[in-house]
Image (cartoon, coloured by chain):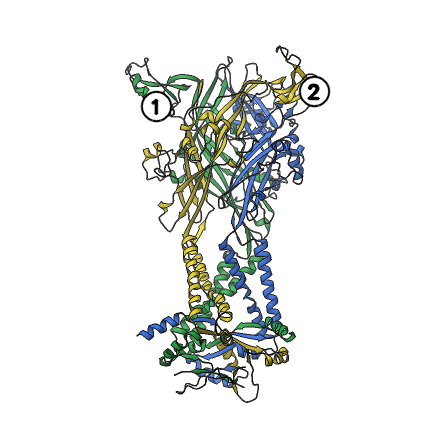
Chain colours: A blue, B green, C yellow
Amino acid sequence: MAPRVLRCVIDFFGYETTKSVVVKSWSVGIINRVIQLLIILYFICWVFLHEKAYQVRDSGIESAVMTKVKGLGSYPNRVMDVADYVAPPQGSSAFSIITKLVVTANQTQGRCPEIDDKFTCTTDDNCTTKSGLNFGNGIVTGTCLINNSSNINNTKGHCEIQGWCPAENDRVPVSVMEGVEDFTIFIKNSVRFPLFNVTRGNFPSSINETYIKNCRHDPIHHPFCPIFKLGDILKHINQYLSNIASEGGEIGIKIGWKCDFDYSVEMCNPQYTFSRLDAVFEKSNVSKGYNFRFAKYYQSPDGTEYRTLHKAYAIRFEIIVSGNAGKFSAVPFMINLVAAFTSVGLATVFCDIILLNFLKGAEQYKAKKFEEVSGIETQSVHKRLYQRSHMSLKVTEKNSDDSGTFCIRHQE
Amino acid sequence: MAPRVLRCVIDFFGYETTKSVVVKSWSVGIINRVIQLLIILYFICWVFLHEKAYQVRDSGIESAVMTKVKGLGSYPNRVMDVADYVAPPQGSSAFSIITKLVVTANQTQGRCPEIDDKFTCTTDDNCTTKSGLNFGNGIVTGTCLINNSSNINNTKGHCEIQGWCPAENDRVPVSVMEGVEDFTIFIKNSVRFPLFNVTRGNFPSSINETYIKNCRHDPIHHPFCPIFKLGDILKHINQYLSNIASEGGEIGIKIGWKCDFDYSVEMCNPQYTFSRLDAVFEKSNVSKGYNFRFAKYYQSPDGTEYRTLHKAYAIRFEIIVSGNAGKFSAVPFMINLVAAFTSVGLATVFCDIILLNFLKGAEQYKAKKFEEVSGIETQSVHKRLYQRSHMSLKVTEKNSDDSGTFCIRHQE
Amino acid sequence: MAPRVLRCVIDFFGYETTKSVVVKSWSVGIINRVIQLLIILYFICWVFLHEKAYQVRDSGIESAVMTKVKGLGSYPNRVMDVADYVAPPQGSSAFSIITKLVVTANQTQGRCPEIDDKFTCTTDDNCTTKSGLNFGNGIVTGTCLINNSSNINNTKGHCEIQGWCPAENDRVPVSVMEGVEDFTIFIKNSVRFPLFNVTRGNFPSSINETYIKNCRHDPIHHPFCPIFKLGDILKHINQYLSNIASEGGEIGIKIGWKCDFDYSVEMCNPQYTFSRLDAVFEKSNVSKGYNFRFAKYYQSPDGTEYRTLHKAYAIRFEIIVSGNAGKFSAVPFMINLVAAFTSVGLATVFCDIILLNFLKGAEQYKAKKFEEVSGIETQSVHKRLYQRSHMSLKVTEKNSDDSGTFCIRHQE
């Protein structure tokens, strides 16, 4: 009993390693080492240096953006400030700067003629077909209102609508607000990398306060300045103010945090890139640019509500924050180190193919590398075959009772 | 010296490969090939074809969404347009369409009775206990106001509050806006895959302009149409307008971009899916639906501010954009190819178990596969054991001074 | 012919396995098993139990957040309700609670003196240099307005501006709204894990309705309560209300869904954490806190527009939802199991180093492990070397025509 248990223990602690064949051949040896070198280089250069696979990465950042626009825009007879042209006013990461306004003042609920040419009519019959249509400025009632005051076409009019009257005419040419190119956008962005518990702001608190308050961002000379001149942004994305201000558009300000916390945290600073977000629709004529409608509501002393409708053409800004930080960590380092070591072994796969097929003396190598054991069930088939075959190696065992020498015979 | 260096170089370029045993056994051979086939099939079908592991993937898209609602809703005595019922008006990816309004007009700062039944009182004592409570329509002053005008319960009143008066009574039945099912939502969505620098819009600029302007989205007949009829969306998610319009609710429009840039970029088009986002709370009676309060502020000629409070029941839309694109890249392709090749070798693990344990002649295979070397420190123990054991193989080395033949003896 | 095809088939189904050397040595055996144990422990404890690598994970959640603030704030002469101090009012995941207001009433378009000390002047020349400057309250016209009414400095004035008049003076001390600490924020958050098609709400519908309506969140006693008292949130992040209310600030409410769907779905509940998002800028004096400007527009009976400008100091809340759920899946389980098994084999790499270099009898092990084959092209070089070398093993093959015994000789 005891010896049997002991043998089990010995067997358990028996160390098993592969038996190797060492081939002293310049050609395969050099090929092997070159492939190994390439694999090592791939791991060092790409996996470790470029991809930084020895780091744990965190891209699920928590970001908070606060924006503040400054500047005064001027219309022919009025000056507009931030409270007038920024919507919504809360200084969030997405906001619009209104650059052109089509104003329809003093609208009240009632009935009036539609403006659009699609609603011209000569008799009520033209309008009854459109009755109930609700995609114009109001609901078509079915009556045709002939404009008597006009001398020439006094038999032509527009269908009557019910809704806010007078109806908006957004085809009137309107002047664009001036001074927009000088507006500045101040961006306060703080990001937190929860995995590393590191919080960073987009401008260092160490930098001079008056500098931060008065600088203008420039990718080369003022990369840390958080104040962006609107004209500069447009220049970066090759857009003309006149175009974008009269038709509206969407501009993306991308703040990219690419940080390596193996270096000082102080070196973790953002990169700003700009793009026109609606660039893909530029060629399309469908809903060109960007505009929206809003109304200011008033109440007259007698209690009737009236409003001023605004169709606002605006530049919409979206601040998109993305982050990706890495820091050395033992687990990914070990995993990739092990992967590198085991991958080096892959060189043998290629070398074996060369060794066993294309090299002078391949048959000898084959004979050394492979040892054959015939299965019991196939022995008879094999015997017949191998007796005829040349250059093959067969292992037979003398199962004699004496402890005879175990031999490997090379068959000719 | 020189020969020693040379030998080092020769050793370095010596190619080392594993010595293999080839077993000519139908059973293990077939099992081996079948397992290898399964592994290869797994890699081809799942890893390469299904998971497309040969691609680099980019799911960190930059997306810009612009929305525009159209349609006119009608209340008994007024028509509401976009400027009235869309909030916020900027056409962002999240917006609400107001479907029902509880209006409390002409509120001014002052003192008045609370409305809610929780604040009924007969004497001031009922109210002093609630004094300072600030979760009603105003701050409870502690006075009980007896409503003298009512004939029946002239001793019952409500606590006095300070705040905007008169207090809002949101239990009054209010009619729902009509025409909501015909409203349309136009969605302009452009996405950019930064890794591939590909930008796509949700409707092709090649498609006819008038089609885009007049179509209505349908998953089968008009999959590229960016205009969604509100009634259709509700049908897709099995919701009744009457329900959602009177209580409010949240609807998600998900735009999924699943692209394969190995094909033409033109084939990268979005898929729209709809869902009721607050579905999980449907059964709960706590804060059912969706509503919010806002006020329109007015000023009377004498300078006192007054306001009209609105409790708005609304359908809130959220447009959620997600993207995932892939493109062939050499590095992941190589990594997975290598993984496939090395995984094929795993078949031996299973086959070895079968070969060495369950097969006829397992002991012979074992003898051929394993060569034993006794460690110096354990030799004495081993000798005693192995002399008794049958069918085991022992390697002994004649450490004689003469260069005797090295033998492997088969012990019986 | 037929036998050749048959031999090919036999070769194809020949099972190839590595030939192994079993070393009966306590030291290496124990080291080997210890390393294997460590590798197995790493896989079981870290990879499987801690990282749950047997699961497919989904972190791309779809989340919908609805918020509702309740409470009444009091200013010396007025009470403010939700419609007054929450902006925007729609109850989205980001909203501001206004805590302090600098009000500039009855502004009209016109000309008036600037307020700021930077714009003091004695003659028009002081102002012409600043003419056109558009970063104050209005556009500088170039005229110096001497304030005649002041007796002392009657030669000192301010530059005239064009814009909304009178100009805002935001340095006036203003009282902070009271009662803010008692405000409550109700959060309704539903998340969907698209991969598992599981939807969860942040409060269970099974819980008593009246409890949900009246509870206050507490991490220990009321973890499922969705109503947060503002004062409690501030306590959690160690902030004083007086500070944040007078200067403004940003607070993040993070809802983390970490779910394991191998357990009941009912156990998937959120965790709430709070943080001051602008903490990193606390030391900086640049744009401290958080404030924004908005205006209420009025129209006088004669049609002239006037407005009341508000500079609002506010606490901004951002609700950040993140999710990460896992569920058992066969594919990652198999992949990691296979990785675990193959990694166990890595122990041999370390043991081989020990065995072949540091162990007593290393040369004998080397001799057993490695079998040398001299390549044909290098044989002559080798012969010369190996004849001199001691303790090296050489394999030579008698290529005689007779089927001579193949021998491995141990050279001395």
Chain at numbered mark 2: C
Q: Tell which of C90 and C392 is nearer to you.
A: C392
Residue B230 shown left or right of residue B8 in the figure: left
Q: Is label 1 in a helix, a strand or a loop?
A: loop
State yes or no: discs 1 and 2 in contact (Cβ < 8 Å): no
Q: Quadrant of the C terminus of chain B?
A: bottom left
Query: Are the residues flagged by discs 1 and 2 from a single subunit?
Result: no
Give the residue drawn at x 70%, y 17%: C124
Question: What numbered label is drawn on residue A293?
Answer: none
Regarding residue B330, the answer to whether it shows in the image is no
Q: Position of residue C334 (x, y in %)?
A: 43, 60
Q: Which residue has dot 1 on it?
A: B116
Q: Position of residue C64 (x, y in %)?
A: 45, 39
Q: Quadrant of the N terminus of chain B?
A: bottom right
Q: Is label 2 in a helix, a strand or a loop?
A: helix
**Closer to viewer: mark 1 or mark 2:** 2
CA–CA distance between discs 1 and 2? 62 Å
Q: Which residue has dot 2 on it?
A: C126
Give the residue type that dot 1 points to. Answer: Asp
Regarding residue C338, the answer to whether it shows in the image is yes
Give the residue drawn at x 62%, y 24%: C136
Q: Tell which of B3 and B171 is nearer to you.
A: B3
Q: Which residue lies most toward the bottom here?
A: C402
Give the residue type that dot 2 points to. Answer: Asn
Give the residue drawn at x 50%, y 59%: B47
Chain at numbered mark 1: B
